[in-house]
Amino acid sequence: MPDNTVTGVYPCYENQFKVDTQGGDGSTAANNKTIADMESFSVSIDGNVEEWNPYDTEGWTRRLVTGKAITISVSGKRNVGDAGNDYIAGLATKTGSDCSTTIIWTFPSGATLTMPCVVNVTEWEAGEARNVAPLAFDVMSDGKPTFTPAA
């Protein structure tokens, strides 16, 4: 059996994302589409940390992470006719549960993060005359994601 362990450095494009274009939970593979022409992404993890100062720590603060949230900020170009790109762009004027879906992040190792989320489109189809139309959005966790290690 071959060893699929990933070691060393890797290019960021080896991270792959799919979005459930039906606003579902990602369990129907046919609904999960890549989003064409995305150029960059950044990930921020916000930990909710509670602090307290008990007498027995002699003035030293105690802390506990009591919650987490993940935001993935994505930017690229608008690609009309691509199912994933069209789906995200179509959320620009929507609100409420219409902006809820699932994103599946596949890491270079083969591990996946399946994350229920809301999508907030932040840049949509406008720019300078000679620019290619942009598409940018934030994918924000909505509940606990599921991390599946690589096989």
Image: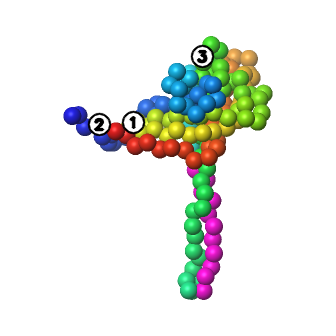
Q: Which mark is residue 18?
A: none
> What amino acid type is highlighted by mark number 3?
Asp
Question: Looking at the image, what colour scheme do you see?
Answer: rainbow
Tell me if label 1 and label 2 are in contact, CB under 8 Å: yes
Q: Which mark is residue 4?
A: 2
What predominant SS class does the magenta segment belong to? strand
Residue that appears at 57% across and 67% down:
64
Dot 1: within a 10 Å radius of its alpha carbon, few (fewer than 14), some, or many (20 or more) residues? some
| 15 to 65, vertically: above or below | above
Instruction: Give the x, y percent position of residue 43.
Output: 56, 43
> What amino acid type is highlighted by mark number 2?
Asn
Snapshot quadrant of residue 72: top right
Horizontal side of residue 38 vs 136, given as left or right = left
| 105 to 70, vertically: above or below | above
Q: Is residue 54 magenta?
A: yes
- From this viewpoint, which residue is outermost toward the left? 1
State the residue position of label 1. 110
Q: Which mark is residue 82?
A: 3
Instruction: Give the x, y percent position of residue 150.
Output: 37, 40
Dot 3: within a 10 Å radius of its alpha carbon, few (fewer than 14), some, or many (20 or more) residues? some
> What amino acid type is highlighted by mark number 1?
Gly
Residues rendered magenta in the picture: 44-55
- The residues tagged by marks 1 and 2 sit, at their Cα atoms, a distance apart of 9 Å
Horizontal side of residue 132 vs 37, given as left or right = right
Is residue 10 at all visible to an observer of this figure?
Answer: no
Residue that appears at 69% across and 24% down:
89
Horizontal side of residue 50 vs 109, given as left or right = right
Residue that appears at 60% across and 18% down:
83
| 144 to 24, vertically: above or below | below
